[in-house]
Image (tube, rainbow, N blue to C red):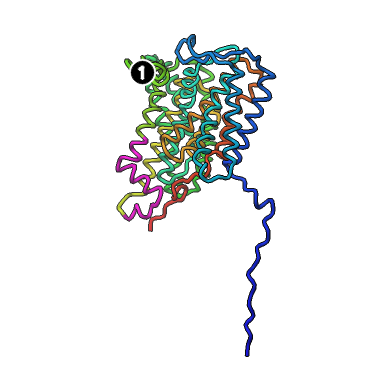
């Protein structure tokens, strides 16, 4: 007779201290805010007098506003940082909504904290700072929108940088040639913008031809276009612009009647230049098209499940072609911002990697127009902040200030946005069954 032996229940080994400690994104940011708060509490009294004040202004003249004690404001914000970080570290589930909102508030408080500290015994105009941030974010936001049009249909587009650079160069070359031929400046500027848009479309068509028709690796195709744009624009600058009077007049700003008189908002949104207005309209238009039209529904279907879309009668390849070209046209317009609206000149590699920052803004915004606009505004603020540091004479080498947008790009992509989910068919060539 066989005897059955009873088995003892398995005993789990005790957890080590390494297994008990779980590093989360919330915990990392909580610890970071605690450290920043402690640093502000320790370092600010050593560098700023107790009676120093900062005048916070919001009007266009920058003469009237709120006077705050610089050291007192910094101390209060530092204590909020420390308290918020400690709350975020508490392992209490019901505190989760509170700690997430508190950390968000801490992140937003960075802006006034930095502006108030660097303007000690001086003034800082929040309206001007926001207006400059929005203006400098124009090419980044438009580049992000160009990426949304492409990637929502399933085509990865890292060639935004090359399309922007090509638009900046060819738009300015066309404008310069037309001016040299005796055409009136406003007409030449308008045609220069059209040339920039069309040049972006041509580069996008090349990308679509390689990646959609011939199913080339989309990353490789985009890299090729970026390299091609660098060589082509450098040749055109050396062959045409250097030998001519290349410094030109930029687009004139104009205020929108009625709206420009609105306090604060009128000066920020309704007193700009044409491409800046175009950026705002494109954000709204892209959102409406993507979420409230048949074309947008089909585009999102193609980006998520092209085989199912094909079954429903949607021409997947044509949809992708059209969306990639639309994205290229937007990128070309973003390039025109550098030359025709801002500097009145063209220089080699003047886009300075902002096409890649636009991709980061697109990912930050989770492939949505308004989210991408928020990401672009974040990067625009970082550029404006570096310029404000230089204006106020902050003793930081300018090379480090120029690094700020790229450092923020790394921080955002590495730890801030969490898990970003692209369209399921993004980057996958479509093979018709």
The one nearer the camera, 45 or 172, is: 45
Q: Which residue is mark 1?
A: 187
Residue at image point 36% right, 28% down: 281
Q: Is residue 373 visible?
A: yes
Q: 412 left or right of 251?
A: right
Label 1 residue SS:
helix
Rendering quarter of residue 146: top left
Image position, residue 50 (x, y; %)? 64, 15
Quadrant that contains the C terminus: bottom left
Image position, residue 403 (x, y; %)? 61, 28
Quadrant that contains the N terminus: bottom right
Question: Label 1: how many residues lie within 10 Å, few (<14), some (14-19) or many (20+)?
Answer: few
The one nearer the camera, 207 or 71, is: 71
Q: Is residue 238 visible?
A: no
Q: 293 left or right of 189?
A: left
The one nearer the camera, 386 or 348, is: 386
Image position, residue 328 (x, y; %)? 42, 35
Per the image, is 310 magenta?
yes
Q: Looking at the picture, does residue 71 appear above or below residue 6?
A: above
Per the image, is 264 magenta?
no
Image position, residue 203 (x, y; %)? 45, 36
| Range covered by the magenta-colored residues | 286-311
Q: Tally the numbered discs.
A: 1
Q: Looking at the picture, does residue 187 appear above or below residue 327?
A: above
User: What type of secondary structure mainly makes up the magenta span?
Assistant: helix
Residue at image point 38% right, 31% down: 282
Q: 20 left or right of 181?
A: right
């Amino acid at each position: 007779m066989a005897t059955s032996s009873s088995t003892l229940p398995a005993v789990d080994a005790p957890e080590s201290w390494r297994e008990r400690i779980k590093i989360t994104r919330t915990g990392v940011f909580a610890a970071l805010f605690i450290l920043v708060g402690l640093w502000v509490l320790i370092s600010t009294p050593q560098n700023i007098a107790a009676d120093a004040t900062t005048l916070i202004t919001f009007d266009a003249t920058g003469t009237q506003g709120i006077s705050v004690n610089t050291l007192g404001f910094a101390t209060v914000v530092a204590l909020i940082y420390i308290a918020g970080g400690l709350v975020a570290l508490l392992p209490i589930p019901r505190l989760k909504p509170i700690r997430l909102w508190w950390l968000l508030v801490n992140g937003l408080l960075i802006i006034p904290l930095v502006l108030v500290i660097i303007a000690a015994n001086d003034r800082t105009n929040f309206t001007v700072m926001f207006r400059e941030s929005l203006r400098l974010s124009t090419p980044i936001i438009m580049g992000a929108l160009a990426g949304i049009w492409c990637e929502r249909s399933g085509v990865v587009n890292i060639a935004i940088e090359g399309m922007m650079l090509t638009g900046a160069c060819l738009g300015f070359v066309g404008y310069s040639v037309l001016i040299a031929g005796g055409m009136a400046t406003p007409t030449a500027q308008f045609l220069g913008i059209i040339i920039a848009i069309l040049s972006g479309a041509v580069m996008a068509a090349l990308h679509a031809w390689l990646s959609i028709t011939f199913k080339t690796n989309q990353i490789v195709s985009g890299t090729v276009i970026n390299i091609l744009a660098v060589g082509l624009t450098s040749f055109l600058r050396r062959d045409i612009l250097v030998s001519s009077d290349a410094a030109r007049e930029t687009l004139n700003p104009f205020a929108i009647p009625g709206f420009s008189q609105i306090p604060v908002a009128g000066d920020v949104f309704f007193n700009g230049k044409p491409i800046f207005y175009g950026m705002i309209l494109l954000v709204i238009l892209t959102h409406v098209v993507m979420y409230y039209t048949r074309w947008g529904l089909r585009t999102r279907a193609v980006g998520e499940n092209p085989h199912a879309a094909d079954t429903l009668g949607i021409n997947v390849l044509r949809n992708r072609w059209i969306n990639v070209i639309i994205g290229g046209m937007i990128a070309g317009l973003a390039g025109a911002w550098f030359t025709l609206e801002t500097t009145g000149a063209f220089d080699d590699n003047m886009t300075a990697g902002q096409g890649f920052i636009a991709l980061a803004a697109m990912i930050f915004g989770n492939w949505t127009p308004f989210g991408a606009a928020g990401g672009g505004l974040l990067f625009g603020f970082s550029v404006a902040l570096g310029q404000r540091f230089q204006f106020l004479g902050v003793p930081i080498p300018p090379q480090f200030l120029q690094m700020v947008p790229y450092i923020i790009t790394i921080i955002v992509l590495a730890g801030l946005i969490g898990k970003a989910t692209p369209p399921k068919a993004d980057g996958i060539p479509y093979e018709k069954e």
